[in-house]
Image (cartoon, rainbow, N blue to C red):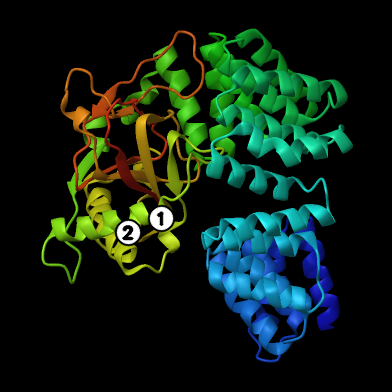
Amino acid sequence: MTDSLTQNAWTLIDHGRAADALSLTEPAARNAGATPNLLMAHAAALKALGRVDDAVAFNRRAVTRAPNDRFAWYNLAATLGDLKLDAEAEAAARRTLALGLDAPEVWLVLGKALQGLRRYDDAEKALLRALARRPNDAAAHLDLAQLRWMRSGRQDEALTVLEAALGKHPGDAGLWLIKSTVLTFAGDHAAADATLTEALRASPSDVLLRLAAARAAGVIGDAGRMLAHAQAAQRLAPAAPEVHAVLCEALLANGQATAAAETAERLVAATPDDQYALALRNTAWRLTGDPRLEPFGHYERLVRAYRLETPDGWSDLETFLQALRARLLELHDLKTHPLQQSLRGGTQVPSLDRSEDPLVRAFFASARKAVARYIEDLGPGEDPIRARRSGAFDFAGGWSVRLRSDGFHADHVHPRGWISSAFYLDVPAVVDNEEAREGWLQFGRPGCLTSPVLAAEHMVKPERGMLVLFPSCFWHGTRPFSDPGHRLTIAFDVAPR
């Protein structure tokens, strides 16, 4: 009976019905005698629903029940990796390998864990071993290309292994997408556009290639071709939310704001908490002068700055900030920015919200108090920002960014957030020039092409020790700065519980 239950649960998960799988496995998984296979299925259902913190307990139980089960150890390693518990993930992955599961997925988990532990040479070796076992593994290629890019700042270094794989697998759309991603975030937009054009000759019906090609065309200002690609993607996958988002971007780029608003409104109706959908709708409403934009227009109420409280155990805030600053600068040990993020000309330290470092934990404990005040300051309301207020919230990601001179954040939103932030540890001296406003935080300038072009509507001057909180659906970015100093920040997202 248990085997049948487990098989049914996996079938439900495979068909996108994780909630049903969870309901099916819940009673048996709570039983002390639950089999390892059932515990693994229950953990997989939890992970599919985004409940990774809950899943790990069941993965741990599975390896306790079956200490020589290589699949139980692999599943534990993967979940630990998702939680950024890198030392434990490394140990579990090595145990998996020792038990004979020499698979690319295991080497990928190991490579990510080693990167999180800042053992970059070992991480590259693990990722190369994953690729030796599956030469066109897209996930391993992406991680390897990104790591080499961040370590070197050279696109040729990032693309060496990928180019060799493309020579052997020229029809692999996933590999072409990774190449275009590297070129895009290296700033070679014309080459990224040409790469996607070449890829589409072999795979004209690949939706992801079409969407990437639409965005690449938009970046170089070719609005007409952007719309053509987006419409082709719509014909291929008319129900996909990502297709509607890119189509909306293309309509905005071509000056078709009314049609963009209609598309975005359907997207918001389908995914009401998607902050990018809200941003696209609000952009279209701004262009059409729609009065429904009014609740989002009060930057002075919705963008608020707080002075961080001195964390418990510290005599004063400045002493704490100096210690936190020194710790973060140790962690910023790579050369340049990651792929698929907003920063340009700097470095990023991910997953700080998962850190066990006492300094980092003290920061988040103090920031939590400011977030609670912000939520209280928002007050009640029925708009998509205030309507999500509840009695509790969780951090949904946290990271640090160190921008060097000429660095900036491209305008963007945080799709899976609710409240976003910027906390300033170091600011360059040039921010004091209130006319140039170099390095300032700006709001309201879309991160996608629009016709007519829309300018920023609100700006905030960075100050050391200041925490700025704002809705995740707000377009925000930073102005570039030219200064010998750097700009060191911590940022995080918050989601209602």
Picture quadrant where residue 243 is located: top right
Residue 406 % position (x, y): 37, 26
The alpha-carbon separation of the residues under discs 1 and 2 comes to: 7 Å
Residue type at numbered disc 1: Leu
Q: Which residue is mark 1?
A: 331
Few, some or many residues within 10 Å of mark 1 (<14, 14–19, 20+):
some
Q: Residue at x 73, y 23 (%)?
A: 195
Residue type at numbered disc 2: Arg
Q: Are marks 1 and 2 in contact (CB under 8 Å)?
A: yes
Picture quadrant where residue 458 is located: top left
Residue 233 % position (x, y): 74, 24
The kind of secondary structure element at disc 1 is helix
**451 up-or-down from 161: above or below:** above
**217 up-or-down from 402: above or below:** above
Task: Examine the rendering and report whether any part of residue 49 can be seen.
Answer: no
Q: Residue at x 35, y 61 (%)?
A: 392
The kind of secondary structure element at disc 2 is helix
Residue 484 % position (x, y): 27, 32
Q: Which residue is mark 2?
A: 327
Residue 86 vs residue 107: left or right?
left
Residue 409 vs residue 222: left or right?
left
